[in-house]
Image (tube, helix red, strand yellow):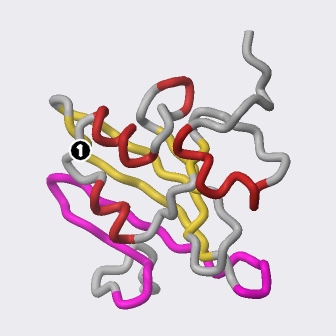
Amino acid sequence: MQDARATPLKGQRACWQSNVGEDPRPEISCQSLSPDFLRKLEHATPAQVVKLFGVPGKDGKPTYFEGVGKVPGFHNGYVDLVYGQGRVTKVNAVTTEFQNNGMAGPEMDFGWEAAKGECSDFPGSTRRCNAVQ
């Protein structure tokens, strides 16, 4: 049995030195969860999702991933994916941007559904997920 503290997975190597002590769980990726990246998940196949993240996903299934990084501008957080007919049909993500002072910025949601389109709390978005009513 492999030690949980073993060598990071392919998608974890890029930022692992800045995440000392992080457990190389199969859902942890060094992929920043930026809006551009999250849009790449729309309509993706499971194989494409795994390739984008560089890790297999929680419990070896490409449905839950975490982006972890400690570089200013990196979008940390998690993303849940739902599939239909072999392609992503729903993306739900919650992120924070790592700041120069080492703290997390405000929480931002990103959502996309094949039938409904996209909402985003990222700056510049015209359709907010958490719009104040």
Q: Position of residue 96 (x, y in %)?
A: 60, 72
Total numbered badges shown on the rendered structure: 1
| Farthest-out residue, top | 1
* Magenta run includes residue 94: no
In the picture, measured across the screen, residue 93 lies left or right of residue 103, that is left
Location of residue 19 by image quarter: bottom right
| 47 in relation to 95, above or below | above
Label 1, secondary structure: give it: loop
Amino acid type indicated by mark 1 = Ala
Q: Residue at x 39, y 38 (%)?
A: 50
| Of 17 and 93, the residue lying toward us | 17
Q: Residue at x 71, y 33 (%)?
A: 7
| 24 in relation to 113, above or below | above
Q: Which residue is mark 1?
A: 44
In the picture, measured across the screen, residue 95 lies left or right of residue 63, that is right
Q: Residues within 10 Å of mark 1 (few under 14, many from 20)?
A: some
| 93 in relation to 88, above or below | below
> Which quadrant holds the C terminus?
bottom left
Q: Residue at x 48, y 63 (%)?
A: 33
- Main SS of residues in magenta: loop
State which region is magenta: 100-124
* Magenta run includes residue 111: yes
Q: Residue at x 55, y 32 (%)?
A: 58
